[in-house]
Amino acid sequence: MKSELESGGSVERAANGAARFASVNPWWAQFLDAAGLDMTGARGDGCYIETADGRTLLDCLAGFGTANLGHAHASLLARFADALQQTSVNVFPFECAESQRLLADKLIALSGRRFGKVFFATTGAEAVESAVKFAMTSTGRPDVVAFRDAFHGLSMFSSFMTGNRFWTEALPWKPGNVHHVDAHNFAALEDMLASRKVAAVVFEPVAGSSSAQHWNAHTSARLAALCRATGTKLIADEVYCGLGRTGTWFGIDAIGMRDASAAPDMIVVSKGLTGGLVPLAAVLLGDADFDAVFGVPGKAKVQGSTFGGNRLAMHCGLIVLDLVERERLVGNAAAMGALIEARIAARFDGRVTVRGRGLALSLALDTEFAPPFGRSMSDVWLDLMDGGVLAMPNSAAPDSLRLSPPLIFGVDEVDFLIDRLDEALQP
Ligand SMILES: Cc1ncc(COP(=O)(O)O)c(C=O)c1O
């Protein structure tokens, strides 16, 4: 991969890529070509992706964490094809579709009935914004607090909740009502919430883009208590970590936020819900917050979405959750995450640190082995790609490597990953 970057041939290839994708994003195509990362995922099969030029890659990204069931899952494809055949009307304005009720009931049941209502949206960012709108409507307050380095999507408002200027510095506008605080800076948080102007605090129980930094039972209970004491809604953004990825159905359970008195007011889920096939997101919330929006004339119009409850996406969600349950993939995510951690501890003697829960993981190099003393994580990443492992650096912490493999990951896959990592760490 590195020799590719250095070779003169890459310049020509970059120009070719840019020309081919002139109508979409020539600059991205050019970057991928120049970096030797211009792959076409020609065929997927379970945890593996075959590229058009004949390479086989162990997929440790699962389409940004969407492909929970891996690729080309036979039952998913057959049942989804069946649902497609039977869907002669997909979006119908004057109904509460039966499939919406079924999927909402399923999500409520999986949450242990901690929530009574579900609102469907299309993307993660839209669902996070929906939750914030519900909090603002329900409390009548205008402000939002999010954590530095968290990621909440790139729609207009979500971009600014995403606590990293990297994503917004090119925009000549910023909302006045989004505030950021460092995770665990309770003194600053207390000051902000004391104003009683904050409608919601948004947090990721296990983060995706900022090296899987996670809360624990103690700090999350403290966060929930602070929100409760000030009448602020607590929103858990589980777009990435929800629905099994952390080895529990919800990220809040993985961090020990089990006590009903410490539960967030809303949970947002998305990526894993439809196995990477169609976009779908959902907000789980309590009856009181839901009714404060949709039960009040004049307020119900505050949020809605053309494709939000479309039948095909509902069917897909039902099929995926059923398969994740039947194949016991939540337990598998916990077991494989623990195995990765154990293998890394045994093989690398403290050189590599693992953060996260289940299969929502992030790897970092111990400072003693990182530059200037050893290899950088980007070197390790490129060598892993050369060795046949698809992974990527975290956008908010590029010196760490994100691992979000399909929940069907097995022992063979763990061993392959660890062997390739061993090779990539060699000086
Ligand atoms: C935690 C989190 N929230 C929100 C989003 C935004 O989701 P989407 O890209 O579907 O809008 C993401 C996407 O990566 C995410 O990881």
Image: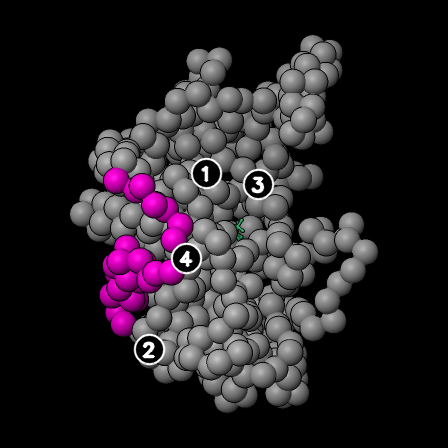
Establish if 189 lies above or below 365. below
Q: What is the C-alpha distance between the residues marked 4 and 1?
A: 31 Å
Please state which amino acid type lies under the numbered disc 3: Pro
Read off the residue under disc 4.
93
Say left or right for 30 vs 267: right
Read off the residue under disc 3.
393
Q: What is the C-alpha distance between the residues marked 3 and 1?
A: 14 Å
Q: Nearer the viewer, mark 2 or mark 4?
A: 4
Read off the residue under disc 1.
63
Say left or right for 167 vs 121: right
Q: Nearer the viewer, mark 3 or mark 1?
A: 1
**Residue occupying image coordinates x 48% and y 42%:** 64
Read off the residue under disc 2.
259
Q: What is the C-alpha distance between the residues marked 2 and 4?
A: 39 Å
Looking at the image, is mark 1 or mark 2 earlier in the sequence? 1
Q: Nearer the viewer, mark 4 or mark 1?
A: 4
**Residue 321 in picture, x, y percent from top left:** 27, 51
